[in-house]
Image (cartoon, helix red, strand yellow):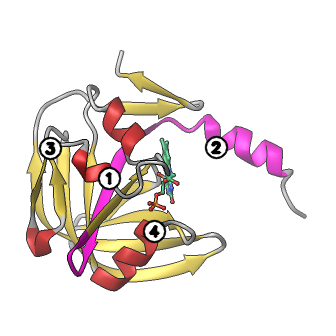
């Protein structure tokens, strides 16, 4: 038995999430994309996961570089989410945001609610996506409000 694909999409649109930009680097080339498929996995050891479409450039760069940073966006960073999901801006995304290099030169996006610097511990290919499990080595935490995404639109808490 298989779920109706349209009902599957409708159901998942009703899942409210935060919004992250997952950044990575291989060689000299930093890269990153907007990701809502993010979750904590374990507190001890500190593990998180992100799901990356295997057609995305970010997927290949994480695989090559072995590191990624989860930048959890703040409520005033809707424009950052738009930049990092735009295929038109694919080669110039980092010119549109303020960032600084973190571990391994992987970009940390300034003004994010949280930056989690991760080393890839495992990867699992399933269907169209790869689940990357990252061991969190450094966390930068602020007290801003989060950017939310629900039913195809950006939302603010409250
Ligand atoms: C709110 C939002 C959430 C997204 N979440 C994901 C995600 O979890 N995984 C994914 O692979 N793509 C996700 N995307 C799509 C990518 O950001 C988009 O396809 C991007 O252009 C891929 O860039 P790249 O090919 O340069 O890596 C999301 C887009 C938006 C707007």
Q: Quadrant of residue 110?
A: top left
Per the model, the C-alpha gap separating discs 3 and 4 is 21 Å
Q: CA distance from mark 2 to mark 3?
A: 32 Å
**Is 109 left or right of 18, judged from the image as shown?**
left
Residue 98 bears which disc, if any?
A: 3
Circle nearer the N terminus (1, 3): 1
Q: Nearer the viewer, residue 142 or 26?
A: 26
Q: Which residue is mark 1?
A: 92
Secondary element at tag 3:
loop
How far apart in space, not on screen, are marks 1 and 2 (Cα)? 30 Å
Q: Secondary structure at mark 1?
A: loop
Residue 12 disc label: 2
- Residue range in magenta is 5-29
Q: In this view of the protein, which residue sits in the foreground, 153 or 10?
A: 153
Q: Nearest to the eye among marks 2 and 3: give it.
A: 3
Q: Nearer the viewer, mark 2 or mark 4?
A: 4
In percent of width and height, residue 156 lies at 36, 21
Q: Which of the two discs, 1 and 2, labels the residue nearer the N terminus?
A: 2
Looking at the rendered structure, which numbered label has been put on residue 57? 4
Q: Earlier in the sequence, mark 2 or mark 3?
A: 2
Is residue 23 depicted above or below 11 in this figure? below
Q: Nearer the viewer, residue 55 or 145?
A: 55
Instruction: State the SS at label 2.
Output: helix
Residue at the (81%, 51%) spot, across then down: 5
Q: Position of residue 144 (x, y in %)?
A: 16, 29
Disc 3 crowd, CA 10 A, few/some/many (<14, 14-19, 20+): few
Circle 4 Cα neighbour tier, 10 Å, few/some/many (<14 / 14–19 / ≥20)? some
Residue 22, position as x, y percentages in the image = 33, 58
Image quarter where the N terminus lies is bottom right
Q: Nearer the viewer, mark 1 or mark 2?
A: 1
Residue 11 sits in which quadrant?
top right
């Amino acid at each position: 038995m298989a779920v109706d694909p349209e009902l599957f999409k409708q159901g998942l649109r009703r899942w409210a999430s935060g919004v992250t930009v997952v950044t990575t680097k291989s060689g000299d080339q930093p890269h990153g994309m907007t990701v809502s498929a993010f979750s904590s996995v374990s507190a001890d050891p500190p593990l998180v996961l992100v799901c990356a479409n295997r057609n995305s450039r970010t997927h290949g760069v994480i695989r090559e570089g072995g590191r990624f940073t989860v930048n959890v966006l703040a409520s005033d960073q809707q424009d950052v989410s738009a930049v990092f999901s735009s295929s038109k801006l694919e080669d110039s995304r980092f010119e549109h945001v303020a960032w600084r290099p973190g571990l391994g030169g992987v970009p940390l996006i300034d003004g994010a609610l949280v930056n989690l610097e991760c080393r890839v511990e495992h990867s699992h290919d399933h269907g169209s996506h790869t689940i990357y499990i990252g061991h969190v080595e450094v966390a930068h935490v602020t007290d801003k409000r989060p950017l939310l995404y629900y039913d195809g639109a950006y939302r603010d808490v409250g």
